[in-house]
Image (cartoon, rainbow, N blue to C red):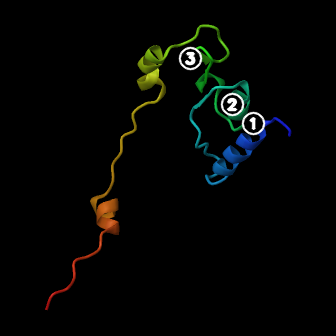
Amino acid sequence: IRRAPHEFKIGCLEDIKALFPGDRNPFYAGFGNRDTDEFSYLKVGIPRGKIFIINPKGEIVVNRRHDTKSYLSLHSLVHGMFPTMLHCEQEDFNSWNYWKIPPPVID
């Protein structure tokens, strides 16, 4: 048995990426618990500074730096790193109006 989990992960991530236009990367950040996760995320274009590896002590290591982050300190970075997305939808085409079953016609 060949122990190379990153090869499988890279393949899966590349398959997902192929569903999007070539000039778009659907991956913004990555979380993992092994060095191979970091390698996989780099391979699909996630920036090194947005790859978070949780070590066996539960510390979050970013960019292989030893200044580890805790979950609490990561929480303070969330709004800066993952900006809020304004979401607007047209009423005519939201899920409720588009997929709802029309009422029956009563004569």
- List the single residue furthest toward the right: 1
- List the single residue furthest toward the top: 67
Q: Which mark is residue 6?
A: 1
Q: How many marks?
A: 3
Q: Nearer the viewer, mark 3 or mark 2?
A: 3
Q: CA distance from mark 3 to mark 1?
A: 21 Å
When the figure is inspected, residue 100 is found, relative to residue 17, above or below; the finding is below
- List the single residue furthest toward the front: 1
Query: Is tag 2's residue or tag 1's residue first in the polypeptide sequence?
Result: 1
Q: Which mark is residue 88?
A: none
Residue at the (26%, 76%) spot, across then down:
102
Q: CA distance from mark 3 to mark 2?
A: 16 Å
Is residue 92 visible in the rendered image? The answer is yes
Secondary structure found at label 3 = loop
Secondary structure found at label 1 = helix
Query: Is tag 3's residue or tag 1's residue first in the polypeptide sequence?
Result: 1
Q: Which residue is mark 2?
A: 37
